[in-house]
Image (cartoon, rainbow, N blue to C red):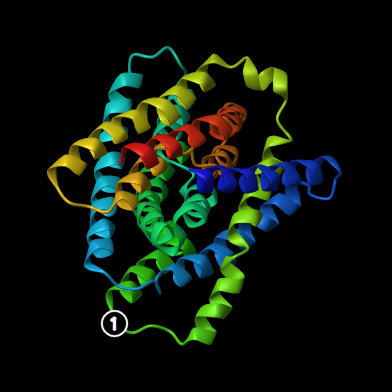
Amino acid sequence: MLQIYIAFFKIFIYITLGLVLNKCRVIDRRTEIAMANVLLKAVLPFTILGASQVTFSSEVLQGIFAVGGFAAAYCTISLLVIYVFLRRSRMTADEKRITSILMVFSNTSFIGMPLMQELYGDQGLLLASVFNLISNLFFYSVGAIVISKKHFRVIDLISNPVSLVSILSIALFAIPWRMPVFIQETISLVGDMNVPLSMMVIGSMLSTISPKKLFMDIKSYNIVFVKMILMPTLALGLCMFLDRMIEVLPVTLITIVVMCALPPNSTAVIFAEQYDTEPEFCARAVALSMLGMLFLLLFWVSVAGKVL
C-alpha cells in the first residue's frame, strides 16, 4: 500500500511540475506537441522494449494472452453497447461520436504504461503494453473512422511506433534469448524518462483549460462516470470471478482493472481538432477526467491491490 502512495506522490509532483512550467511559459503548445512526439516515437518504444527482457515465465505468458483477450473483448463489446445506448441521446451527432470514443478508449500510452511500470516494474509494463497494443488496433481503426467520419487507413496503424514495438516485445519475451546487459542498461536509461516526461505533458495540458467551462459541462461528467467508475467496476467484478475460477497472477488482473479505470485517450483531442469534431467538448471531457484521475485512479489501484 505504501508503494502505491509513493508512486502517486511522484506522479503528482511530475504533473505539478508540468503545470508550473506551462504557467511560467517554459512549456507552450508547440513544446507539448514536441514532448508528446518524443514520448510516442522514442521514449515509450524504448520503455516497452526494455520490458521484454524480464525473466520468462509461463505465468506471465498466460497473463499476456489473458490481458490481450480481455482488451479485444472489452473494446468490441463496449463500442457496441455504447453505440446502441447513445442512439436515443439528444446530443448532436458529433458529440455522440466523441462520447463513444472517450467512454471506451483509455490513455494507456501516457498514463497506463508509466503507472504500471512505476507500480509493478517491467512485468506490469509488459502486460500494460499488451493492453495498449490491442487498444491501439481498435483506436486507430474504429476510433479513427468514428471521429474523422472517413475510411480506415492501414498506414495510420502500422506507422505507430508503440504498436510495432509492442508486437516486437511480445516476440522477444517469448524467445529464450536476452540482450547483453550493457544494451539493456542503455535501453533502460532512455526508458526511465517515460514516467516523468509523460506526466509533465499531462500537467501542461491541464493548465490550459478554463475552470469555469471545465466544471459546468454535465456531458463531461457523464463520460467520467462511465469511463472511470462504471467500466472499472464491471472489470473488477469480472476479475474477482476469474480469480476464483482459474489460477492467474494478481498483477494480470490488476492490470485489467487499472487499464479500464484510466482517463480517456488524449489522442482523441488531436483527432477531434484535426477533423473539427467537437474539439472543445473533447478537450474539456479529457481534462475533467484527468483531474478525476488524481482521486479515482488511486482508489482503483488501492482496491484492486487489496481484493485481487
Residue 144, compared with residue 99, is above or below; it is: below
Residue 54 appears at what percent x and percent y? 39, 71
Residue at figure coordinates x 28%, y 59% from the top left: 64
Relative to 183, is 81 on the left or the right? left
Residue type at tag 1:
Pro
Q: Residue furthest front?
A: 2
Residue 286 appears at what percent x and percent y? 56, 33
Locate the C terminus by quadrant: top left
Q: For this rendering, which residue is in front, 278 or 58?
A: 58
Residue 160 seen in the current view = no
Residue at figure coordinates x 17%, y 51% from the top left: 247
Q: For this rendering, which residue is in front, 264 or 125?
A: 125
Residue 252, compared with residue 230, is above or below; it is: below
- Circle 1 SS class: loop
**Quarter occupied by residue 240:** top left
Residue 190 seen in the current view = yes
How crowded pointer 1 is (Cα within 10 Å; few <14, some 14-19, many 20+) is rated as few
Q: Residue furthest left?
A: 245
Q: Residue furthest right?
A: 24
Residue at figure coordinates x 45%, y 71% from the top left: 49
Residue 198 appears at what percent x and percent y? 61, 52
Residue at figure coordinates x 35%, y 45% from the top left: 254
Q: Exactly how many numbered labels are in the figure? A: 1
Residue 167 appears at what percent x and percent y? 35, 67
Q: For this rendering, which residue is in front, 183 or 107?
A: 183
Relative to 272, is 74 on the left or the right? left
Q: What residue is disc 1 on?
A: 176
